[in-house]
Image: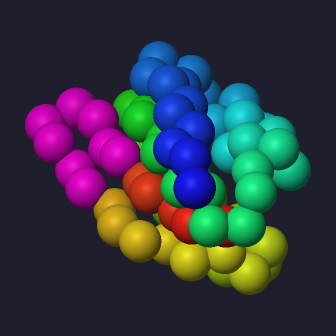
């Protein structure tokens, strides 16, 4: 199992979602994809896309200006 880190801070839709999907295609079962971003709409869209891809959303953390979403393939 590996961690795949994606930093999309400062990017707006659809970039965070596209990057999450790219990482999902490359990931092996059990890998974690850690997405770090700042765009509010992406924070809602990524978990919905993860659910559509049948992956597990492990956590969603929010700091002052950014969020971190961890999903497992």
> In the visual, does 13 lie left or right of 18?
left
Q: Quadrant of the C terminus?
A: bottom right
Residue 38 image point, x, y percent? 39, 32
Residue beneath the point at 22% across and 50% down: 62
Q: Is residue 64 above or below residue 51?
A: above
Q: Magenta segment, which residues?
A: 61-68
Foreground of the two, 46 or 34:
34
Furthest toward the front, the residue is: 1
Q: Quadrant of the N terminus?
A: bottom right
Residue 64 image point, x, y percent? 13, 37
Residue beneath the point at 42% across and 54% down: 69
Foreground of the two, 12 or 53:
53
Residue 65 magenta: yes
Furthest toward the top, the residue is: 10
Residue 55 image point, x, y percent? 66, 75
The quarter holding residue 61 reads bottom left
Residue beneath the point at 62% across and 67% down: 30
Residue beneath the point at 57% across and 39% down: 4
The quarter holding residue 54 reads bottom right
């Amino acid at each position: 199992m590996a961690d795949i880190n994606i930093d999309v801070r400062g990017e707006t839709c659809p970039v965070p979602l596209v990057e999450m999907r790219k990482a999902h295609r490359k990931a092996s079962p059990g890998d974690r994809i850690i997405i770090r971003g700042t765009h509010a709409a992406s924070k809602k869209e990524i978990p919905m896309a993860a659910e559509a891809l049948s992956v597990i959303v492990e956590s969603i953390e929010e700091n002052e200006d950014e969020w971190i979403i961890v999903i497992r393939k």
